[in-house]
Image (cartoon, rainbow, N blue to C red):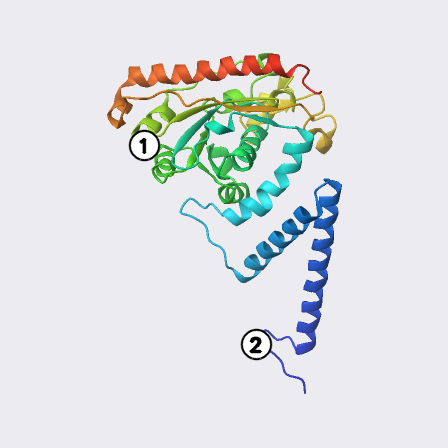
Amino acid sequence: MGEVNADGAGPAAHVVLEADIADLVDLLVGLLRWAGQVAGLPEHEIEQSVAAKLSFLRHRLTGEFSVDEFGFDEEFAEHVHLTLLRPLFRHWFRVEVVGAEHLPPEGAALLVMNHSGTIAFDVLMAQVAVHDHSPTGRWLRLLGADLLFGSPVLGDLARKAGATLATHADAAGLLERGHLVGVCPEGFKGVGKPFRDRYRLQRFGRGGFVAAALRAGAPIIPTAIIGAEETYPMLANLPQVAKLLKLPYFPVTPLFPHLGVLGVVPLPSKWIIQFGPPIDTAGLGPADADDAMLVFELTDRVRESIQRTVYELLEQRGPAFF
């Protein structure tokens, strides 16, 4: 009688399982090589990518990976999150990155961004821009809304990809540990505004992000993003439907909801992301974070800097889709 293992499966079952895994690995390698060839990558880059993905898969199967105290999983972010976003970044939105030299190679900094586009692709493209264009391949740790983390699945994936809840405690914790932190002070007012208000920045709130940067001694880097406004032009909002679905808004765009799932495909607008010179906070320290007037003035300076840059980039870009 054949030997039966603790899991109830005989040797033949394990041979079949190993064969199935080998077939899946071969399929994965074939798909990765095909994708690299379609993208026009050199042969050596394709093989490097294949080796990296196989290493990632091995670590996942053996449990040899770790996450930080905020839930960030660097291997997942590199091999899944960014891998999925790069085709959009490079070939669909054709993102041009300006001012990457203003990103510090190490140490804390707060990137303050305008927010738009109905679905928040802007912060995801900013993550790719920071990682792939900063001198040392840094990660942008995003501060996200409660709504995102209210979903167990989306919240877990967001944390693995580097996001965390937009609270004073988490912002302070990330900055104190020397991370690059990304924040969109406009919140849903920015990402959910109608297309007729495109590229007009909404109010930045009470300046909590400025206070956090001052307390951590972190520079503030104004970051302007254009292109996102045209991906899902919001022609109307259906508040009753939004309320029913417990969403901040329910958009009507030229393609959604008329085309169903196809309407969720973003339009291929031309994007530019510009990292500006750090806002000068020389002479300011943690104690200044409690000066409401100073925080308000600094918040206004950051907002004006981003708004001015947005208008300049729009003039440089020309047509939105070419």
Q: Classify 10 Å Cα crowding around label 1: few (below 14), some (14-19), many (20 and above).
A: many
Q: Residue at x 72, y 45 (%)?
A: 35
Read off the residue under disc 2: 6
- Residue 131 lies, in percent from the top left, at 53, 37
Q: Residue at x 30, y 29 (%)?
A: 215
Q: Residue furthest bottom?
A: 1
SS at mark 2 in the image: loop
Which label was assigned to residue 216? 1
Tell me which amino acid carries mark 2.
Answer: Ala
Relative to 263, say whether 27 is above or below: below
User: Could you say which quadrant of the image residue 13 lies in?
Assistant: bottom right
Q: Total marks drawn?
A: 2
| Residue 166 as seen in the image, left or right of residue 6 | left
Q: Residue at x 62, y 52 (%)?
A: 53
User: Could you say which quadrant of the image residue 244 lies in?
Assistant: top right
- Residue 241 lies, in percent from the top left, at 60, 26
Mark 2 or 1, which is nearer the eye? 1
Q: Classify 10 Å Cα crowding around label 2: few (below 14), some (14-19), many (20 and above).
A: few
| Residue 52 as seen in the image, left or right of residue 39 | left
- Residue 268 lies, in percent from the top left, at 69, 26
Residue 199 in view (yes/no): no
- Residue 92 lies, in percent from the top left, at 69, 30
SS at mark 1 in the image: helix
Tell me which numbered mark, 2 or 1, is placed earlier along the sequence.
2
Residue 116 in view (yes/no): yes
Query: As rendered, which of 76 and 257 lies closer to the eye?
Result: 76
Relative to 30, say whether 246 is above or below: above
Tell me which amino acid carries mark 1.
Answer: Ala
